[in-house]
């Protein structure tokens, strides 16, 4: 499916997540659409998947074969979601959505005014919030600076 290849190319252009999660949206979607389109999964996606699997092994240890036996009856045939759910029209709609996300279409269409970004009551709130997000959630405020912020009330 050529649409799946286009979706994978647009997804690969998306920036990496600023805050590290247990699963990356970008890599999980690239793997998903590679499987749908019959495209080989890129090396960086496989490496990210192995790191995610290591994190998941610490959290939950379940036997997937036992779960499959419980969920799918032996006599019942497993449905082929790839052919049943993802036809060319649906993939084109998903490609359009991914392009809108990549081009920030709705963020530009519904631009936020400076009046909302710097409210009179707490003008530094959004700048501090964006600084914390840009740090990737890795750096934390020290005890002294947090105490000073709470006492002074200047966020």
Image (cartoon, rainbow, N blue to C red):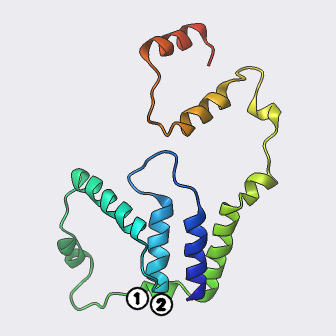
Q: Specify the quadrant of the image occupied by residue 11.
A: bottom right
Residue located at (23% from left, 84% from top) = 73
Residue named by callout 1: 80
Question: What kind of element bears circle 1?
Answer: loop
Query: Contact (CB < 8 A) between labels 2 and 1?
Result: yes
Identify which residue, 128 or 9, lies in the foreground.
Answer: 9
Q: Position of residue 83 (x, y in %)?
A: 48, 90
Residue named by callout 2: 83
Position of residue 124 relative to residue 90, above or below, is above
Position of residue 52 relative to residue 99, above or below, is above
The quadrant of the picture occupied by the C terminus is top right
Q: Position of residue 32 (x, y in %)?
A: 45, 74
How many neighbours does mark 1 have within 10 angstroms: few (below 14), some (14-19), or many (20 or more)? few
Q: Position of residue 86 (x, y in %)?
A: 53, 84
**In this picture, residue 142 sits left or right of residue 13:** left
Q: Specify the quadrant of the image occupied by residue 31.
A: bottom left
Question: What kind of element bears circle 2?
Answer: helix
How many neighbours does mark 2 have within 10 angstroms: few (below 14), some (14-19), or many (20 or more)? few
Residue located at (49% from left, 16% from top) = 146
Position of residue 79 relative to residue 150, above or below, is below
Q: Residue furthest front?
A: 43
């Amino acid at each position: 499916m050529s649409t799946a290849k286009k979706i994978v190319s647009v997804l690969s252009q998306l920036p990496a997540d600023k805050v590290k999660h247990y699963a990356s949206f970008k890599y999980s979607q690239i793997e998903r659409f590679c499987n749908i389109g019959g495209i080989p999964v890129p090396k960086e996606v496989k490496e990210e998947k192995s790191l995610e699997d290591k994190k998941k092994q610490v959290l939950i240890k379940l036997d997937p074969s036992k779960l499959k036996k419980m969920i799918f009856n032996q006599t019942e045939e497993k449905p082929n979601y790839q052919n049943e759910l993802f036809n060319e029209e649906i993939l084109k709609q998903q490609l359009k959505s991914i392009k809108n996300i990549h081009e920030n279409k709705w963020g530009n269409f519904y631009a936020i005014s400076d009046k909302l970004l710097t409210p009179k009551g707490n003008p530094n709130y959004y700048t501090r919030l964006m600084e914390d997000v840009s740090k990737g959630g890795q750096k934390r405020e020290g005890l002294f600076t947090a105490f000073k912020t709470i006492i002074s009330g200047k966020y």
